[in-house]
Image (cartoon, rainbow, N blue to C red):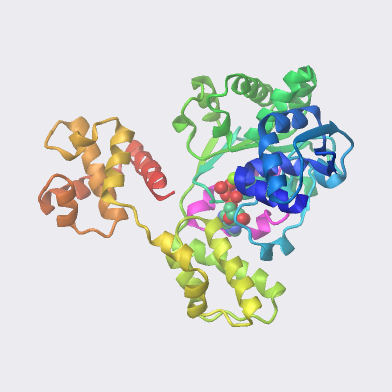
Amino acid sequence: MWEQASAELRNTIGETHYQTWITRLEFVGVEKSVARFHAPTTFVGDWVSRNYADKILNSISAAGGQASRIEIRVAEMTAAHDAGPAAPAQGHASAAAADRAVVPARAAGGDGDLPGATLDNRFRFENFVVGKPNALAHAAARRVAEAGPVTFNPLFLYGGVGLGKTHLMHAIAWQLRAAHPELRVLYLSAEQFMYRFVSALRDKAIMDFKGLFRSVDVLMVDDVQFIAGKGGTQEEFFHTFNALVDQNRQIVISADRAPGEIKDLEDRIKSRLQCGLVVDLHPTDYELRLGILQQKAEQYADTYGTLTIQPGVLEFLAHRITTNVRVLEGALTRLFAFASLVGREIDLDLVQECLADILRTSEQRVTVEEIQRKVAEHYNVRLADLIGPKRMRTIARPRQVAMYLAKELTPRSLPEIGRCFGGRDHTTIMHGVRKITSLRESDRQLNEDLDLLRRLLQS
Ligand code: ADP
Ligand code: MG
């Protein structure tokens, strides 16, 4: 019953919340209309009671159970539940489960008592395909993983969703753990950092918290944009950060955008984050996508020995699925699972049948209107002005940027784009595109703007 109820719950509250909270509970049973659970800490128990009680009860009744109240007791947990919130595994169909053994972060080694997140066994350097878009990030991560003298601190990795930030951080942790078991390596998400901080405050254990975070040799915090706007947590993060930098301990941070672009992050934190090496993972290109698919297909070939892939299939996928690597992997996983179920070889027909939905969504191209809206927002100009006739530079430049992106990201012709810009002539559009192309060669800020806008539009 709980299995069914928790599946339902996972749907209603979403994978991330489910992984963070619900998987940490142990279901004991329903007795006299009370659903009983065990939780590893008071904090988890309280949080779940306050935020999820209704939803848990609903899902239990949907699964045919009868409970009108939940009761959560703090108790010793079996290892599976006590491992802490696992990194959410989004988009991995069950076929991928086989190669997805997770190991609790409290494995033996210098970091034995550290409350880190679970490391994904697949996220290792050996499995990371290097291409032009991620070469720098990969090299920097490798350098950190060598545990030599700290030369840049922090390493700040940023890039859009699904481009390999978490993969690289786990890879660093795995390698350090293998080659330098004496080092205390702590990897966790910014969200987990916050929960730990908040629960330390509640449990009046803030000195323990500080002591623990200041005792690590390598600290990695994933998705740091999460703490933006969260006052106390930011403050504590800042102090932890400074204390570690002062002691020359390596820090690795990831975020979905550059430090300067994170809204509601204090300036002093932004500037500290920029002090080290800031590296950007670019959107994948065709070659990288193909490389990743080939690697994955080889791994699957080991699992599903008898399946064959027709030539052209991987190329087709690399060409058509340009969103992010997670979607790409999901597509391949589904193909293999489907092919093995129906006992067919993987050819383009199967691809069309089995991936129709993914192929459809990746067809949805960016529109000129969306580009105009995002560009106007980014440069703080009014949309009407961006499209209208005003000629001052503060508006003309963003307008040219929008023209440039419209040409680059949509299949529209110059005259069509001209019509979207208040009926301008196609030569005006061409001039705008050329202007931006030539400015790009020397204007760093412009390049950053374009990168950011592209990322926003293509996410
Ligand atoms: P992010 O943290 O940037 O959102 P992840 O690190 O979670 O992205 O990567 C998403 C998925 O794509 C993971 O399964 C990861 O293994 C895979 N992936 C991303 N980049 C690569 C790469 N260069 N080589 C192999 N796998 C990759
Ligand atoms: Mg990530």
In the image, 274: left or right of 199?
Answer: left
Please tell me which residue is depicted at 80% across the width and 46% down the height of the picture: 104
Q: Quadrant of residue 13?
A: top right
In the image, 42: left or right of 128?
Answer: right
Q: Nearer the viewer, residue 341 or 418?
A: 341
Please tell me which residue is depicted at 45% across the width and 59% down the height of the picture: 322
**Image: 212 above or below 89:** above
Please tell me which residue is depicted at 52% across the width and 47% down the height of the picture: 161
Residue 121 image position (x, y, % from top left): 73, 54
- Kindly give the residue lying farthest to the right in the view shown: 76
Residue 257 image position (x, y, % from top left): 48, 38
**Image: 313 above or below 247:** below
Range drawn in magenta: 121-147
In the image, 357: left or right of 124?
Answer: left
**Image: 211 above or below 134:** above
Residue 269 lies in the magenta stretch: no
Q: Main secondary structure of the magenta part?
A: helix
Residue 139 lies in the magenta stretch: yes
In the image, 71: left or right of 356?
Answer: right
Q: Nearer the viewer, residue 294 or 250?
A: 294
Residue 411 image position (x, y, % from top left): 27, 60
Q: Nearer the viewer, residue 329 or 341?
A: 341
**Image: 146 above or below 410:** above
Residue 449 image position (x, y, % from top left): 35, 39
Please tell me which residue is depicted at 40% across the width and 50% down the height of the picture: 458
The quarter of the picture showing ligand 2: top right
Q: Quadrant of residue 402?
A: top left
Residue 111 visible in the current orientation: no
